[in-house]
Amino acid sequence: MRPELLNPLFRPVTSLAGVGPKIGEAFARLVGREAGEPPRVLDLLFHLPYGLVDRRNRPGIALSPEGAIVTLEVRVDRHQPAPAGNRRLPHRVFVQDETGEMALVYFHADKSWLERALPVGEIRFVSGRVEWFNGRPQMVHPDHVVDAAAFAALPMIEPVYPMTAGLPRKTVAKAIGAALDGLPLLPEWLDPALKAQQHWPDFATALGTVHRPAAPSDLAPDSPAMTRLAYDEFLANQLALALTRRTLRRAAGRERRGDGRLRTRIEAALPFSLTASQRTAIAEIERDLAGPERMLRLLQGDVGSGKTMVALMAMAIVAEAGGQAALMAPTEILARQHAKTLGPLAAAAGLRLAVLTGREKGRERAAILPRLADGGIDIVVGTHALFQDEVVFRDLALAVVDEQHRFGVHQRLTLAAKGAAVDMLVMTATPIPRTLVLAAFGDMDVSKLTEKPAGRQPIETRTLPLDRLDAVVERIGAAVAAGARVYWVCPLVEESEELDVAAATAREKALAEALGPVVGLVHGRMRAADKDAAMRRFVLGETRVLVATTVIEVGVDVPEASIMVIEHAERFGLAQLHQLRGRVGRGSARSSCLLLYKGPLGPVAHDRLAIMRDTEDGFRIAEEDLRLRGEGEILGTRQSGTPGFRIARLEHHGALLEIARDDARLIVERDAALGGPRGAALRVLLYLFGRDAAIRLVRAG
């Protein structure tokens, strides 16, 4: 039950004066609500300005610099309307002060309205951007033209908001002003000592300061108002994670101790020895599984660091203890890849492994489900299909979730509900900076794989402009003739009018014309069976160049592939480029990655490609990605598993995250039911920042 005092903030924006259904639709676009979800008054309050217009500069006409926003007190001298029948020429109003004369320029203007607003001989205050044209100053469509009485009420500092088509600036400002005026009196949820130490205002004052700034410093990321709001968002995030963790942990774990017999067989069947960090991670997992609490562990490892082997050893431990394990991957390609990697090793250890995705239907599916239910299968590898109601386990002991950022917390909980006290291991090949680990996975212990397995080849990375495409195709042709296998990645599946990007379908056709029938194609809109068939032909070497979209970003493993070409590399994020590059360098051949870009490059794209050339260290790349882009993009698209902060920016406010985590931990230790006075205030906070699912966990528990 949402606290009643929040009802005014959860009203639709169309309840505000002057906001009808059509304007409401534009607001939905502006604040990024899902289709069909009406924007709320609260969404306006969290739609913060990104800059401001300072109208305090009053230099006089002759001293107004080019491009500056100025406010001038002027006398109206004369009107020069556009010639009759020529609407393309503007209406000019000439004004003057003691320093000189300027023209106010209006295109497609209503002559009678202008004559009323700017009567000849009268004093007016005008504010806007000055341009110098042929040595004379002018102001095109001033922002404000008012008399002395209205000027006294004019805000000298105005916030500038992100905008969308169909919404005038004044409408946005007026609606946000109305939302601020209707903000109810909310209880204080911050720890009083922390608030005093940081010199933070209360929540309402902080919002008012940001939306009605008195100086440019009010909008700085490190201002008291901005840091207060960022901390509120972090605290809501960390408290929700802490409550989720407590709910999972409180259903006490079951001690699962293996005897090592299956692991010994797996290790004997491995063609290589485990790295030191793999052994450390396995020991950490073994300790968790043997403990009385449920395991919730994040396994981070760079591309090719051997996470899947660690997962297999974890699954072997629970099988030794008589339980079952499930490995869930975000895509069918990846699920089958895992099954192919793990199958022979599981068989060598006597572990019974099955695959369950949306593709297993009819007789095949009917054969798997009873064996899961009666314990005839030890390990099942699958996709979302594992969530379905008819999938029942005899004793699901361990759930391994691969590429966690593709799944939300609620999906983790759904899989965990398939057994009694299910332990959870989450894997990601996207190395995540420490601050982001806290933000997205604050409810987890973390293991890191820091080495690459022995025999992994370094990858030579080069950048080339797209106008050298013909030379690249020629070199690829020579490499293919010598036996090489090549990935060629394009950003889009089909031609887009808006974006000048090569489509995978068109690129495949062009490469097939240049290189012959050795070119294959795989993209996200293909049927699963067609995708698998295209991958199979590439794995067998029937095709030697695989043109693909980013469906090959995660998990595809073809050791013979030694060249990666990424077209329009400037359009990809660093983490994604690093993931794609990691598809090569897996076999014995020397490997290379060509980043093709369309110039001229902006500073961020330039830095991104330079970092790719300089290092293969995924953790360093992740830190640089955070620095260059902020957290919004770093885990790929903003999906249910990512933090997706609206106010807080990890690159500016990351240090506050540790404080919020410690605060949340203390809150849960002292008042996990959020029953005391501060608990009631914290419930308000969770609703404000959309983390109220955690309150349902409190009630359920």
Image (cartoon, rainbow, N blue to C red):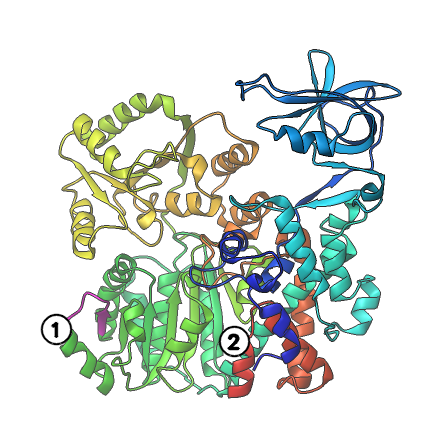
**The N terminus lies in which quarter of the figure?**
bottom right
In the picture of the structure, the residue carrying the numbered disc 2 is 693
In the picture of the structure, the residue carrying the numbered disc 1 is 362
Image coords of residue 339 (percent x, y):
25, 64
User: Could you classify mark 2 by the number of other residues whose Cα lies within 10 Å: few (under 14), some (14-19), or many (20 or more)?
Assistant: some
Left or right of residue 490, residue 101 in this image: right
Image coords of residue 214 (percent x, y):
81, 48
Image coords of residue 526 (percent x, y):
22, 50
Taking depth in this image into account, of 136 and 605 the one nearest to the observer is 136
Q: Which residues are magenta?
A: 353-363
Secondary structure beneath label 2: helix
Residue at 69% x, 78% y: name it: 681
> Is residue 237 shown in magenta?
no
Residue at 48% x, 74% y: name it: 296
- Residue 184 appears in view: yes
**Image: 545 above or below 366:** above
Taking depth in this image into account, of 352 and 647 the one nearest to the observer is 647
Q: Amino acid at mark 1?
A: Gly
In the rendered image, the residue lying farthest to the top is: 134
Foreground disc of the pair 2, 1 = 2
State which tag comes first along the sequence, 2 or 1: 1
**Image: 9 above or below 552:** below
Residue at 21% x, 70% y: name it: 347
3D distance between C-alphas at marks 2 and 1: 37 Å
Left or right of residue 486, residue 235 in this image: right
Secondary structure beneath label 1: helix
User: Could you classify mark 1 by the number of other residues whose Cα lies within 10 Å: few (under 14), some (14-19), or many (20 or more)?
Assistant: few
- Residue 438 appears in view: no
Image coords of residue 64 (percent x, y):
79, 23
> Is residue 356 shown in magenta?
yes
Residue at 59% x, 57% y: name it: 646
